Image (cartoon, grey):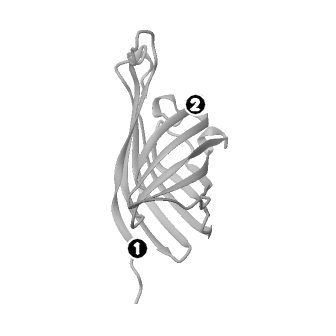
Amino acid sequence: PAILPDVRLAPGFAWLWFSALPDFNFPLETVDGSFGFWAGQSHDRFAWRARLSHWSGHLGDGAADIEETRIVYSRESITLLGAWDANPHLRLHGGPGFFYRAHPRTQAFQFQAGGELRPDLNVVQPGRRVDPYLAVDLRMKAENEYRVNQSWQAGVRLTDGDGRRALRIHLGYTSGISERGQEWRTPESYVSLGATFGD
């Protein structure tokens, strides 16, 4: 019998961007959010996922000249992504995406590719496993004249005994055209330190 793909409501995400001013003042500059649906399936070393999503970007109340600079920014997109476990320590991913509605209007095509290297150092604590990793994600968008955004990340992945629940602690570097909606044509690069729940 045919195996039906797993269909789920994609979790919602929010990106909050704060500036840093003297006297420990951190005004909120931009707020971006995304949600949607995805369907996917995995078999042996291969997996795929199709995602339908909405993304919008807004200026925060700490941004300068809000009334003069804000725009209406929203995107609806379809993304098709495949992944291949080349071996137990290397996963590669890639696939196209398309905006099917965009405001401001723009070119639709985009492509994403990357991978994750997970050396097996056998660091195991009672009921928990610690796996270091190095990952890269490259995103090319026609609206950015096919410039490639680069995201690099190094960190550790902490999982429980069955390997299903994960916490990542990571250091990252991102360079390219801003992924923040209100800054969608602005070159940007930054270093980040964070924690992510989920795989």
SS for callout 1: loop
Q: Residue furthest top?
A: 23
Q: Position of residue 100 (x, y in %)?
A: 47, 51
Mark seen at residue 145: none
Kindly report the distance in space between the C-alpha atoms of the residues bearing marks 2 and 1: 37 Å
Work out whether 128 lies above or below 54: below
Work out whether 67 lies above or below 95: above
**Which residue is drawn at the image coordinates 62% and 38% (left, top)?**
144
In terms of depth relative to the viewer, which is nearer, 68 or 165?
A: 165
Rendering quarter of residue 19: top left
In terms of depth relative to the viewer, which is nearer, 183 or 74?
A: 183
Q: Position of residue 170 (x, y in %)?
A: 52, 43
Q: Earlier in the sequence, mark 2 or mark 1?
A: 1
Kindly identify the amino acid type of the residue bearing the numbered disc 1: Pro
- Which-is-in-front pick, marks 2 and 1? 2
**Which residue is drawn at the image coordinates 67% and 41% (left, top)?**
147
Residue neighbourhood size for the residue with mark 2, other residues' Cα within 10 Å, grouped as few (<14), some (14–19), many (≥20)? few
Q: Which residue is mark 2?
A: 190
Q: Position of residue 82 (x, y in %)?
A: 55, 65
In terms of depth relative to the viewer, which is nearer, 78 or 189?
A: 189
Location of the N terminus (image quadrant): bottom left
Kindly identify the amino acid type of the residue bearing the numbered disc 2: Tyr
Residue neighbourhood size for the residue with mark 1, other residues' Cα within 10 Å, grouped as few (<14), some (14–19), many (≥20)? few
Location of the C terminus (image quadrant): bottom left
Q: How many marks?
A: 2
Q: Which residue is mark 1?
A: 5
**Which residue is drawn at the image coordinates 39% and 78% (left, top)?**
4
**Which residue is drawn at the image coordinates 55% and 48% (left, top)?**
108
Rendering quarter of residue 159: bottom left
Q: Position of residue 184 (x, y in %)?
A: 52, 33
SS for callout 2: strand
